[in-house]
Image (cartoon, rainbow, N blue to C red):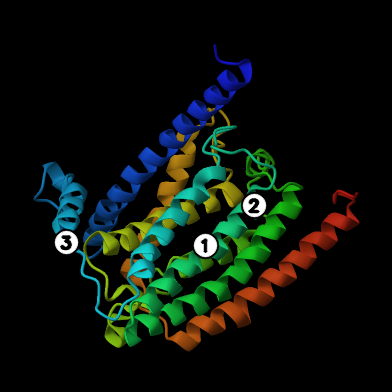
Amino acid sequence: MMSPFWDSYTGILILSILKTLALVVPLLIGVAYLTYFERKVMGAIQLRKGPNVIGPFGLWQPFADALKMLMKETVIPTGADKVLFILAPMITFGLAIIAWAVIPVNNGWGIANINVGVLYLFAISSLGVYGVIIAGWASNSKYAFLGALRSAAQMVSYEVSMGFVMVTVLILAGTLNLNEIVNAQRHLWFAVPLFPLFIIFFISGLAETNRAPFDLAEGESEIVAGFFVEYSAMSFALFFLGEYANMILISGMTTTLFLGGWLSPVPFLPSGVLWFLIKVLICLFVFVWVRATLPRLRYDQLMALGWKVFLPISLVYLVAVAGVMEYLGWLPHA
């Protein structure tokens, strides 16, 4: 006969697994269909049709792409470090998924509603650079290594600004719990009083995910696709999916920190998951829109934007918000 402790432990474990599947399965489907969404939107912007052959309106195209990648052979270069070479795309994709553990899609709807959710996101985002560096080094290719160095410098540079922006938000909300940060925006979304930081956060998100116009790590005209130049088949697909999962993650973080999460923008309409998804889709549309319209920056322009523009503005805004909150007596004191 099982003890009550074992019964309760088993119940908690099963509940955790079900909550994880309820988030991860739709997320993986969303990642697959984000590729379709991007190609359709870019097609419309460039006066093309986009995918329209496989299935009605080309809706089965993501599954055809996945099948093609699964059937291809994974080629490992002779001089590569085989273990790290295979491990790098797994790290990149895995980190993009596990960061969602603390993102609430509705009030209390999160895998882990922890009181230090912002710190958890800090930790996971800082680890993201490891997959890229390991891939560039393990490939034993000069082009891959140069791409990895570019990407590492870029991600570290823009993480500093993103960090200051997130600290400003948590000072304004008075909590590190992401669920409570959303609830603190019931009367006014943080995108309104922190509009410059909202823009800085979103643009830094473009740089963090190596998206145009900040895709210097994949500069095909200079370094032949960058850090994943030696990858093929499913190992390449994991990098590809990791990038799109990170796009959804940045959109989810932007929605949570600045756009009121699941809260309804219309007073007479109920809040819920649907509003969260709508806001995330709008952010993803801007990701694609920017890629389709803006040219790639030079590397010196990219670094100057991060260190000479975003960093000073975010730091000044952080000090100003903290000063105003202290002056008004709104800062919590120990």
**Residue for badge 2:** 118
Circle 2: residue type: Val
Question: Quick one: 293 or 168, which is closer to the camera?
Answer: 168
Sequence-first disc among 3 and 2? 3
Give the number of the mark in front: 3 or 1.
1
Q: In the image, 58: left or right of 163?
A: left
Q: Quick one: label 1, few (<14), some, or many (20+) residues within 10 Å?
A: some
Q: Which mark is residue 202?
A: 1
Mark-to-mark CA distance, 3 and 1: 28 Å
- Which residue matches tag 3? 48
Q: Marks 3 and 2, how far apart in space?
A: 41 Å
Give the mark nearer the N terminus: 1 vs 2: 2
**Residue at point 31% right, 77% down?**
80
First-in-chain label (3 vs 1): 3
Marks 3 and 2 close (CB-CB < 8 Å): no
Q: Are marks 3 and 1 in contact (CB under 8 Å)?
A: no
Amino acid type of the residue that numbered disc 3 sits on in the rendered structure: Arg
